[in-house]
Image: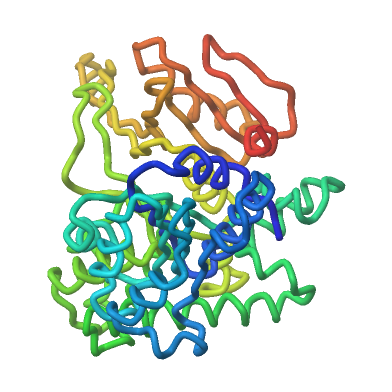
Amino acid sequence: MIPRPRYLQKMISLRDKHVIKVVTGIRRSGKSTLFKLFQEYLLGDGVFPKQIISLNMEDPAYRKLLTWEKLYDHIDAQLQSDKKNYVFIDEIQNVKDFQRAADGLFIKDNVDLYLTGSNSRIQSGKLATMLTGRYVKIHILPLSFKEYVSAVGEDNMPQKFQKFLELGGFPQSLEFTEIDDIKSYIESIYDTIVVRDISESNNFRDISRLERVIKFMADNIGKETSANNIANTMLEDGIKINTRTVERYLKALCDSFILYRADRYDVRGKKLLKTLSKYYIADTGLRYTLLGDRQIDTGRMLENIVYLELARRNRKVYAGKMDVLHKVEDETGKVKNRYVQKEIDFVVEGGSGTEYYQVAQTVLDPVTLERELSPLSAVSDHRPKYLLTLDALPVNDYNGIKQIYVLDWLLE
């Protein structure tokens, strides 16, 4: 099993806390493996095997337990009355009225309960209602580059990063050596999510239109996007779809963790903007599989990887926007003040406060360097500012803006 230290430490920190621990994330991102890693930790920390009850509700062996009453009775019969019991239920959304079993186990003083689920029935809004607010989420993503390197070795790092950039980090994909096999595996994940987790759960009947929206979003990661823009673009291609339907599709894609939304943040006004969010895909291998070789686009996929890494580090990530006052000459030579909009790739909020990030494939050209530094330079506060690039150079400092080789940053 590939170590997942960040998530494992989170599980350890929540151990025995009186909340239901719910592990969420895109299918095949490693939720079941995280359970196994944590169970190994428990066994090594003095917990006896009989204290651990683990069920995967997609396993046909548990086909008779797919109602909440039968599941509850099955688990209750195995509980050790004089010890803490650690109960793990994988893919619990397959159990009818699963929240009733979860609530029944939760109120027992000797049960520490852990759940996973993959479709929209166990996403944030519905989960809060079903579990009456007595839960905490541990959100898991496919492998980070650091986790990927821990599995494949540290030699020839740039070449391995290029492969990671294209094929992503679904853990099981590392078992394959041929690119075609990896793509087929990722396609199977995609098909399962679209058909089972999205279409069936949301009663979407026109899968072809849904897939057109998915491919549009994959092709436009990191770009300002709105449901209205998508509907208009598809109409130009001869596909009639209304804005409300696109909004439902986008919500379902985010609920199933194929997409993540970064709302725009006005740095000068210090407020969130309601329009033109940016979206990023859960794994760059999904984008490569959907769009093919012609759409590798290293710069945008690098931005996607940085977004996911910031999210992994428990940060709130926004797309920054800033109006900067410039003096410009009009056609008569008269100097006027004019606001020019600049974009900062990511405005990040977390435990250490606000940070600003700009991402670029290369800034060896002085003009490109100035263009990338300019938005960060316009920010007047003294919070940390970073320029992440694929230029394998020592850390540079430009008046407080640190340029860092992105592989070093990813491996921190």
- In the image, residue 178 sits, relative to residue 26, either above or below, namely below
Q: Which residue is depicted at the point 42% across and 64% down?
A: 116
Say left or right for 252 vs 362.
left
Number of numbered discs: 0
Residue 394 is drawn in which quadrant? top right
Q: Which residue is depicted at the point 42% across and 53% down?
A: 112
Q: Looking at this rendering, what residue extends furthest in the front direction?
A: 82
Residue 71 is drawn in which quadrant? bottom left
Q: Which residue is depicted at the point 27% across and 65% down?
A: 250
Say left or right for 3 vs 220.
right
Residue 324 placement (x, y as % from top left): 28, 21
Residue 350 placement (x, y as % from top left): 39, 28
Residue 200 is drawn in which quadrant? bottom left
Q: Is residue 87 visible?
A: yes
Toward the viewer: 349 or 99? 99
Q: Which residue is depicted at the point 43% across and 65% down?
A: 218
* Position of the C terminus by quadrant: top right
Residue 121 placement (x, y as % from top left): 27, 71
Q: What's the colour scheme?
A: rainbow
* Position of the N terminus by quadrant: bottom right
Toward the viewer: 124 or 388? 124
- In the image, residue 220 sits, relative to residue 172, either above or below, namely above
Toward the viewer: 319 or 146? 146
Residue 372 placement (x, y as % from top left): 49, 30
Q: Looking at this rendering, what residue extends furthest in the right direction?
A: 155
Say left or right for 250 vs 81.
left
Toward the viewer: 307 or 2? 2
Q: Is residue 237 visible?
A: no
Say left or right for 64 vs 251.
right
